[in-house]
Image: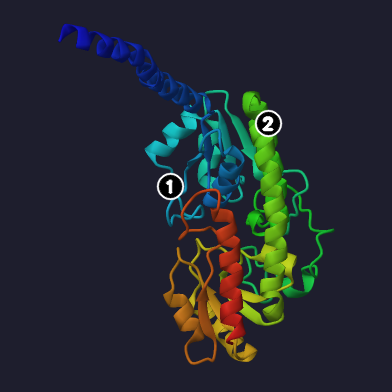
Amino acid sequence: MKRALGPALKILALRMPALAIPVLAIPTLLFSGTMRAADAPVVVTSIKPIHSLVSAIMQGVGEPELIVDGAASPHTYNLKPSNARALQDAKVIFWVGPGLEAFLEKPLQALGRDASIAALDDAPGLVKLPFREGGAFEPHDDGDEHDSAAAAPEHEHDHAEADHDHGAFDTHLWLDPMNAKAMAAMITTTLVAADPANALTYQGNAKALDDKLDTLDTEIKGMVAPVKDKPFIVFHDAYQYFEHRYGIRVAGSITVSPETIPGAERVSEIHRKVGELGATCVFAEPQFEPRLVNVVIEGTRAKSGVLDPEAATLKAGPDLYFNLMRGIANSMKDCLSSA
């Protein structure tokens, strides 16, 4: 019996080291993966469209944090304690700029550490369009009257550069994929400077994103082409960049600034305009009061739709920007084609 056990035990002993190697290697691999995650810089972003672009460029390195999450709007957002902690821990912070995320201006100025803060409204190559006032659009508080529909350039980007004063230009810059490309270039440069060890990954991801944005631009042109000459009204004047890029016709907005609820006189004025236009569309937004749109279209042939310029209803991530832009194009096409 002992002689029979001897060879078997020897065979088992010979096999044990081979079986033990993968088991011993597992903790090492897990530890290595943990180290790679820990090495990623802490990156904080302000709003979903910016978070999406940064996420796409950081794929394979890490995931940025997002401040304005869910259905919240940067126009009305209040900084949470968890947001303040994230800013204190950040190595890189991306925001559009004080013209959009005013709630971030003082906290960023008060940061007591050396984070890289990139205001993407400073990105080289951006097209910037001035706010529209008067005419079909609600005048600002200064009372100046300008016919914005006539003053706005017809799908031209050449003269659109505005002075960089707070509020001097429309801050919904991401609604033109060419502006998204310009912001992505600045994001890449900032990440490479802050984290040169992952420069090749950032640059490779940026090139892939750039190509996808070109494809998206061509796709949207085809989607809106059949309805681009049909006028419509939006909840607030957030769509200039989309409008100029694709030649669509925004006839006016219920309000210029979503922080200010329009008065009865303004609502009556828009109601009359909808009647004058005939069959058209009036678009609400998910963050703001939908009853205003119902009042505006009551008794008219106009249809209602929803546009989501800040991606309130979309899941954050690298695909969000593309879902956002396709969603706007689809909503316009669906409503206007049946109007």
The color scheme shown is: rainbow
Tell me where residue 305 appears, x and y as whole percent: 51, 76
Q: Secondary structure at mark 1?
A: loop
Q: Quadrant of residue 154?
A: bottom right
Specify whether residue 103 is in view.
Answer: yes
The residue lying furthest to the left in this view is: 1
Specify whether residue 254 is in view.
Answer: no
Q: Contact, CB < 8 Å: mark 2 with mark 1? A: no
Instruction: Give the residue type that dot 2 points to.
Output: Leu
Q: Foreground residue, 212 or 334?
A: 212
Q: Quadrant of residue 248?
A: bottom right
Q: On residue 290, which mark appears?
A: none
Mark in the foreground, 2 or 1: 2
> Dot 2, how many residues are within 10 Å of its Cα: few (below 14), some (14-19), or many (20+)?
few
Q: Residue at x 48, y 78 (%)?
A: 293
Q: On residue 78, which mark appears?
A: 1
Q: Foreground residue, 182 or 148?
A: 182
Tell me where residue 9 appears, x and y as whole percent: 25, 11
User: What's the distance in space between the residues labelled 2 and 1, CA to CA?
Assistant: 37 Å
Of the image marks 2 and 1, the number of the one nearer the N terminus:
1
Q: Foreground residue, 211 or 74?
A: 211
Q: Quadrant of residue 56?
A: top right
Instruction: Give the residue type that dot 1 points to.
Output: Asn
Tell me where residue 159 appears, x and y as whole percent: 83, 59
Q: Residue at x 46, y 82 (%)?
A: 295
Tell me where residue 51 appears, x and y as whole percent: 55, 46
Q: On residue 200, which mark appears?
A: 2
Horizontal relation, residue 302 to residue 225: left or right: left
